Amino acid sequence: MSWTGALREVRTMRFEEVYGRVQRGRLSCAQAADILGMSERNFLRYRRRYEAEGAEGLYDRRVGRVSGRRLAVDVATRVIELYATRYFDFNVKHFHEKLVSEHGYKFSYSWTKRVLQDAGQVKPAKKRGVHRRKRPRKALPGMMLHQDGSRHQWVADVEWDLIVTLDDATSEIYSAFFVEQEGTMSSFQALREVIGARGLFGALYADRGSHYWITKTAEQGVDEETPTQVKRALDQLGITLIPASAPEARGRSERMFGTLQGRLPQELRAAGITTMAAANQYLREVFLPAHNKAFRVPAAEPGTAFVAYIGRDLDDVLCIQEERVVGRDNCVAYKRLSLQIPPDRHRHHYVKAKVRVHEYPDGRLAVFHGPRCLARYGADGKLIGETENAKTAA
């Protein structure tokens, strides 16, 4: 006997026993209903059916009948076919969104998951481990941002680094782009995009990568007395850099990368994108707006902690800065380049003077003497236009 049949027999025997006690006057209808766990009105309905049809009247007539709301077999077959041929690398949630938005289906995510699992297309998720208490989000956007990179095969047979900067309060991604290798310049590019569009923020939460921190040993932690180029730039902007001690401490950004790795490669494949330039354009114009709309959460409090940036040219802060001593030929040696300082009406030469070389994310260079820019150069070390020795930084 099946489990359904056995349960039905037990319910019938229990009802008959209580019904007999009512007939003998030992229980009232209200007491009988309370024993059976139903309302008095429902008990009276069952009693009438029992007296008219016997035990058959107690059986649930829905058992064994196909639901009138059940979808046709060909609909489930079409869903399985779509997943197997077009969306084979999508997760179930992402696939369900595509069915609704692009194919006009209106059935639930649970139904979609059950159909795919029954067909062997996807496996049930493993049971989750012990829950870790999440750190509460910041109250306002701009109080703290996360920045991290993820190396992954975002398009077929190629691995790139994806650099992402998102807000702790809302999980909104402010900047995301692909680069060949994560490093100082990619961090500067991301910070430039965020500050240029939003303004200054309070703190940046990042891992202990060498472009953020100098770490002698794992036991000693980060060396805050010897700042990296990124730390120096953030200090000049008044932004606090916070080191994360473990991947678990970066849970919010780690979960975000899990979502991106489960969706972005599939979207790029479906769009036929294989180059980095096209991927960055798609990411900026198509994917990020839709992603933020779906995954952004409201901040705990109204308002913003972003502050408008007012100061020297932001490019001259978010760049590599290194000191050099001018040679006897009035040139500055930098990375196998010889940067010739042009004539200056303020002094005859800068021989043996300490100057500062700026290297920008796009490869351009500049030489500063104090706040004054003496000259700007291309990536090949050649002068760009006229000298800018009159230009000062605020």
Image (cartoon, rainbow, N blue to C red):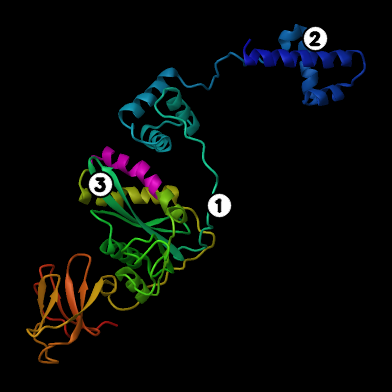
Of all residues, the one furthest to the top in this rendering is: 53
- The amino acid type found where label 1 is placed reads Arg
Residue 215: percent from the left, percent from the top? 36, 65
Q: Is residue 264 magenta?
A: yes
- Looking at marks 3 and 2 on the same chain, the residue that comes earlier in the sequence is marked by 2
Q: State whether residue 161 is above or below residue 364.
A: above
Q: Could you tell me which secondary element the residue under label 2 belongs to?
A: helix
Q: Residues within 10 Å of mark 2 (few under 14, many from 20)?
A: few
Q: CA distance from mark 1 to mark 2?
A: 58 Å
Give the distance between the C-alpha atoms of the residues marked 3 and 2, in whole angstroms: 74 Å
Say left or right for 377 vs 356.
left
Q: Amino acid at mark 2?
A: Glu
Q: Which mark is residue 51?
A: 2
Residue holding disc 3: 159
In-front residue for pair 69/200: 200
- Quadrant where the C terminus lies? bottom left
Which comes before the other along the chain, label 1 or label 2?
2
Q: Residue at x 26, y 82 (%)?
A: 393
Left/right of residue 68 with respect to residue 225 in the rendered view:
right
Q: Main SS of the magenta segment?
A: helix
Quadrant position of the N terminus in the picture? top right
| Relative image position of residue 254 (x, y in whole percent) | 41, 51
- Residue 326 at x, y percent in the picture: 14, 83
Which region shows up in magenta? 257-273
The residue nearer to you, when weighing 260 against 218, is 218
